Image: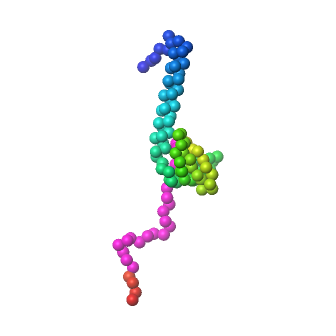
Amino acid sequence: MPIDIEDLSFEELLELNQRVVARLKMLESMQAHIEMMRFNPGQRVSFAHQGTRLIGTLVKYNRKTVTVVTDDGQRWNISPHLLAPVKDAGTAEPQQPADKKKKQLR
């Protein structure tokens, strides 16, 4: 839908610009919120920094970013779209099923 702005005055163009900028900020904020909700506080996450992968724990939601504390104690405010969840490797020793019991010697 084309919008003819040729006949708008200076003041009307300023008002239009302010409304466009406000709308863009709102859409950006909504997108950041949606991306943030993929993660939970306490969740292990990773992100790239200068060619290395840093791993840490998400500790706080901010307005447009999340705060991550890395394993070495550094605090980072990161855009959520740059984060990746860290999958648990699990335990190294296999566990026995709960229904099987070891025989006891008398």
Which residue: 55% across, 14% down? Answer: 10
**Could you tell me residue 76's position as x and y percent?**
60, 47
**Could you tell me residue 82's position as x and y percent?**
54, 44
Q: Quadrant of the C terminus?
A: bottom left
Which residue: 50% across, 24% down? Answer: 20
Most extreme residue toward the left is 99
Q: Is residue 64 above or below residue 98?
A: above
Most extreme residue toward the top is 7
Image quadrant assignment for residue 99: bottom left
Q: Is residue 68 above or below residue 1?
A: below
Question: In terms of secondary structure, what is the magenta stretch mainly?
Answer: loop
Q: Which is nearer the eye, 69 or 103?
A: 69
Q: Start and end of the magenta stretch? A: 80-102
Which residue: 57% across, 53% down? Answer: 56
Does residue 49 show up? yes
Residue 101 drawn in magenta: yes
Does residue 82 show up? no
Most extreme residue toward the right is 50
Q: Quadrant of the N terminus?
A: top left
Please give left or right for residue 102 compared with residue 54 in the image.
left
Which residue: 36% across, 75% down? Answer: 100
Q: Which is nearer the eye, 16 or 100?
A: 16
**Could you tell me residue 4's position as x and y percent?**
47, 14
